[in-house]
Amino acid sequence: MKNSPSLVAMYLAIILAGLLFALPNVLPASVLERWPTYLPNQPVALGLDLRGGSHLVLEVDGTELRQERVRNLAEDSRRMLRDADIHWRSISAREGSVSIVLRSPEQQDRARELLAALANPVGAVRHDVEVGQNAEGITLTLTPEGLHQSVGRAVEQSLEVIRQRVDQVGVSEPTIQRIGADRILVQLPGLQDPTQLRALLGSTAKMSFHLLGDASSPDGIRTLRDDGGNAYPVRNTVVLSGDRLSDASAGFDQQTGEPTVNFRFDRAGAREFADITQMNVGRPFAIVLDDKVLSAPVIREPIIGGSGQISGSFSVQEASTLSALLRAGALPAKLTVIEERSVGADLGSDVIQKGIYAGIAAFALVFLFMFVLYGGWGLIANIALALNVVLTIAGMSVLGATLTLPGIAGIVLGIGLAVDANVLINERIREETLKGKGALSAIDAGFKRAYATIMDSNVTALIATLLLFWFGSGPVRGFAITMALGIVISMFTAVSVVKVMMLSVARRGRLKTIHIRPLFGFRLVPDGTGFDFMKRRFAGLGLSALLVFASVVLLFKPGLNFGIDFRGGIQMEVAASATEDLSRYRAQLEGLGLGEVSLQTVGDERRLLARVERQPGGEVQQTIAVERLKAAIHAVDPQASFERTEVVGPKVSGELATAGVLAVFLASLAMLVYIWARFEWPFAVGAIVTLVLDVVLSLGVFAVTGLDFSLTAIAALLTLVGYSVNDKVVVYDRMRENLRSQRKASLRDVINLSINQTLTRSLYTSVTAFLAVLPLAVWGGPAVASFAIPMAVGIVIAACSSIFIAAPILLFLGDWRGRRGGGAMCAADPGDRTSVAPSRPRSVAMPAEGGVRA
C-alpha cells in the first residue's frame, strides 16, 4: 500500500507534459511568438464552426467522365481506322460504349486487332476497355474497373489543380484532402462567402479551340451555345488544347474598355496556333470553355505572336475568375458541390464565448456538487477532474485534432462522465469502511472492487463513441474525439492519480479509518436503504409502456423535425440590419418558386433562420437556389449579412441518414455482444430491450419539442446508448457480485439488494452528468440545443429505466429460464479463475422466486 516513487514520478511526468502541451491554448499570440521552439507551441486548431469559414465537399462526376471517355474512344477509333484505310459506315457513341459498323465485314478482324490498342491495362489481367463483336459490328465497352481507375486518377489530379486555384483566392491555411473514393473536402478558414470559390472549384476550365463545320464534317459536330443563347456547329476535333496555355490574365480592351481575358501559348502551342490560323484564314474559329462558346471570331489573318484575347460580356470579377481558372489548369473531370457550409467569423466567436461559459458553469456545478457530497475527498476528485480537462486538450494538441462546437460539448459532457469513476470509488471505499476495514485497506479494496465496473462502463461508452467517429462527419467527429479522449484519460486521472493522492493523504495524516461523508452530514440516499423495487415493478413497467406508446404516437404525428443533414436543402442564418416584419421576408421568399420555405427568428428578433426544401434536379440546382435566396433577402434588407449557410444535396442527405441509423443499430448490437460476453444472455437481453425503449423515449423528446433531428441528434442518441448501458452495467456488476456472496437469497432479493446498494452511485452520477449538460442546454445556443436538451432528458430516462425496466426484465427472464430448466445464472466473473465447474454450479437458480441450487 505504498506509493512507488518511480510510479509517482511517471505520473508527474505525464501531468507535466500535458500541462506543457495544453499551455499554448491559454497564452496570448504575443507570448507565443517569443515562446521557445523546443517547447510545444501549437494551440488546438479551431473548426470552421468556431472561427468562421467555408466547407465544401466536391464529387467527381463519374457520368461526365464516362461520357468524355466514350467520346474520346469514338474520335480515336475514327483516327485509327482512317489511318489504316479501313472504311466505316457509322461510329456512334452510346451509354458506356462505342458501336462501329464497317463498310466491309472482311476487315472486321483486322479492325478489332487495331482497336485493341485503345484498351489500357488495369491491374494484372483486366483492361479499361473491352473490345467485342456483335451482329452489327465492333463494340468498345468501358469496364467497371476502368471507370473506377479513371475516377481515382481524376480525384488525384483534381487535388493539385484545386490547390493551385485556391492559391489564386489567397486563403491561408486551407484544408484540401481526398475523402472516400470520389470526393474532395475543401475547408477555407475566414472565407465566408463561397460564391467565387464555388465558381473556381465547380468549373473544369477545359479550354479548347475548334473549327466550325456542318453536317458533312468527317469528325462530326456538336451544337454549343454562348451566354447569349446563340448556337454554333462546333466540330468535335480539338485543333488546339488549352493545355498549351502558358499564362492568362484579366485586362481591358483598349478600344471598348470592356473586361477581357488575355492568354499566351507556350512555344509549341504558339507554333500550332500560327499554323491553324494560317491554314484557316476567313473561317470562324470557336474558343470553347466547358462546352460553352466564349467567342467565335473569324480568322482575318495568321496570328503568329502566340497570344490572343477573349472578349465578351464579362464583368471584372468574371474575367478575374476565368483567368485564374486558366492559369491553374483544367480539371480532368467535372466536380459537383454536393455539400456546402459556411459560418461567419462573428457567429463563430459568439459560439466560442457561449461554449466557454457553458464549460466553466458545468465545471463549477460539478465541482461544487462533489465537494458537498464528499467534503475534502471530493476536492481530490475535483483535482482529477481538472487534470482530465487539461489532458484532454493536451491530447488534442498532440493528435492535431480540431476543436469544433460539438467537441466543446464532448468536453463538457466528459466532465460529468469522468466523475462517474470517482463516485464509484468513493462509494466503494465507504462500504469497505462500514465493514470495519482500516483506511489503507479500505482504499485498496475500494479501488479493486470498483475497477472492473469502471472498465465495463467505460468500454461501453467507448463503443458508442468509436461508432460515432466511424459513421459521423465533420464537427460530429470532433465530438467523438473529445469524448473518447476524455473517457480514456479518466481511467488515468480518476483511478491512478486519485489512488496515489488518497494513499498519500491517508499515510501522511496517519489515518486509521477513512471517513468519506457529505459536507453537511446529509446524504441523498441514507445508508441501509431497503426499498422493495421489484414489488412495484408492474407499476414501473406500466408507466414505461405508456410513455413508450406516447412516444411512438408522437413519432407519427407531429413526427421528427428532420434537419438539413437528413432531408437536404438549404438553411441560412441571416443577421438583419434592423428588426423587420417577417411577413416581408416571407412574401419575397415564397415568390421565388423554390417550394416550401420556412422562416423563423432565432436568438433575437434580428437573427433569422430561413429554410428551403431540397430542390429537384440534383446537386447543381441547390447551388443555384442559394444565389436566388440571397438575392431575395438582400432585396428586403440590403445590409443583411449571412452568418451561416448550409447546402446539403440529396445524395449527401441520404448517406447521412443511412449512416445515422446504421450507427445506432451497430452500437446497440455491440452493446448486446459485450454484455452477453461479460455476463449472461438474460442480462444482455434486459439491457438491450431497455436500451431500445430509452432510444424511443428520447426520440419522443425530439418529436414533442420540435428540435432539429440532425447529426448532433445522432450524437446525442449514441451518447445516450453508451450512458444507458453504462448505468446498467454498474447495477449488473453488483448483481453478479451478490450472486456469489448471497447464495441462499432469491433472485428477487439479490436484484433489490443490488439496486439499493448502487442507488447512491446511480443518483449521484446522473446528477453530475445532468449538471454538466444543463449549462449547454441553457447557454449553448441553437447550435447545440438538439444535443444538450435531449441529453439532459435522456440522462433521467436512463437512470429510471435501469431500475424500473431493466431489473424487472432480468427477474422475468431469470424466473422463466428457471421454470424451463435452463440452469442458473452465472455467479462468477468471466475472469475469475475460481469460477464454478458446470457439473456443480454454485449459483442462484430461478424456480419460482429463485431457490438455492446446490
Image (cartoon, helix red, strand yellow):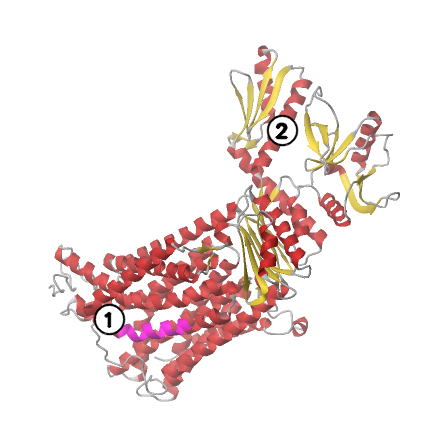
Q: Position of residue 763 (x, y in %)?
A: 33, 74
Residue 385 magenta-highlighted: no
Q: What type is the residue that disc 2 sits on?
A: Arg
Q: Which residue is mark 1?
A: 754
* Residue denoted by label 2: 71
**Residue 303: image location, x then y, percent:** 85, 33
Q: Is 769 colored magenta in this rendering?
A: yes
* Contact flag, marks 1 and 2 (Cβ < 8 Å): no
The answer for how far apart the CA atoms under marks 1 and 2 are is 74 Å
Please tell me whether mark 2 sits on a helix, a strand or a loop: helix
Q: Nearer the viewer, residue 765 or 609?
A: 609
Q: Principal SS element in the magenta part? A: helix
Three-letter amino acid code of the residue under disc 1: Ser
**525 lies left or right of 603:** left
Percent from the top left, x then y, of residue 256? 86, 43
Q: Can the viewer see residue 13 in this picture? A: no
Specify which label sits upstream in the sequence, 1 or 2.
Answer: 2
Which range of residues does the magenta coloring cover? 757-770
Q: Residue at x 47, y 72 (%)?
A: 775
Residue 58 vertical position relative to residue 385 in the rendered view, above or below: above
Q: Position of residue 691 (x, y in %)?
A: 32, 59
